[in-house]
């Protein structure tokens, strides 16, 4: 078995599946390297994001939605809009957390502030339907055009 992938290699692998719904390929076997990268570095956010996905779906590690949420929060606090959007989705779906439309909207808002387009879209839908926020169709329309 050759040397462990470097952070750069792991990031390059991640670029082959940028859609978080697709995730890493089955049997990728990289999770131990991501754990190591997280422990050693101020890790490349793509490596951290992939590690989070592994925990969220149980790919190569036991499924641990609470750990995934904690890691998403860390990435969101660090300015990763996609992580903020994903926390919003967890709250919207009640996945690993108690379902909360207001918490979902809060994280969609943060994602939108970080220019994450799907976060803006989801926040617009929240304002449109008054889900977790006061209904505001004008704000929903502005967010939809953002």
Image (tube, rainbow, N blue to C red):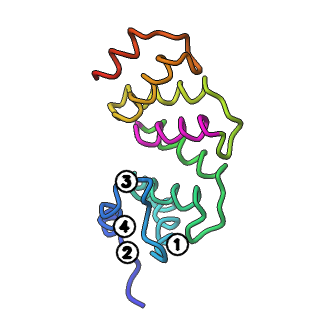
Q: Is residue 82 above or below residue 12?
A: above
How many angstroms separate mark 1 from mark 3 (CA)? 22 Å
Quadrant of residue 97 within the rendered picture:
top right
Q: In the rendered image, which residue does mark 3 sit on?
A: 19
Verify whether residue 87 appears in magenta: yes
Q: Residue at x 60, y 64 (%)?
A: 58
Q: In the rendered image, which residue does mark 2 sit on?
A: 5
Q: Residue 48 appears at what percent x and percent y?
A: 46, 55
How many angstroms separate mark 1 from mark 2 (CA)? 10 Å
Query: Magenta residues, as a range?
Result: 79-93
- Is there CB contact under 8 Å for labels 3 and 4? no
Q: Residue 64 appears at what percent x and percent y?
A: 66, 57
Q: Residue 84 appears at what percent x and percent y?
A: 47, 37
Residue 10 is labelled as 4
Residue 32 is labelled as 1
Q: Secondary structure at mark 1?
A: helix
- Is there CB contact under 8 Å for labels 4 and 2? yes
């Amino acid at each position: 078995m050759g040397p462990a992938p470097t952070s750069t290699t792991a990031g390059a692998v991640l670029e082959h599946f940028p859609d978080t719904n697709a995730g890493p390929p089955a049997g990728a076997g990289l999770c131990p390297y991501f754990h190591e990268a997280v422990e050693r570095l101020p890790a490349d956010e793509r490596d951290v994001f992939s590690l989070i996905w592994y925990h969220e779906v149980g790919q190569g590690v036991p499924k641990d939605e609470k750990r995934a949420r904690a890691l998403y929060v860390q990435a969101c606090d660090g300015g990763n809009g996609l992580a903020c959007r994903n926390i919003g989705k967890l709250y919207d779906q009640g996945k690993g957390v108690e379902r909360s439309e207001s918490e979902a909207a809060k994280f969609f808002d943060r994602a939108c502030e970080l220019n994450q387009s799907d976060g803006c879209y989801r926040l617009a839908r929240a304002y449109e339907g008054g889900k977790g926020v006061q209904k505001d169709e004008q704000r929903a329309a502005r967010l939809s055009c953002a």
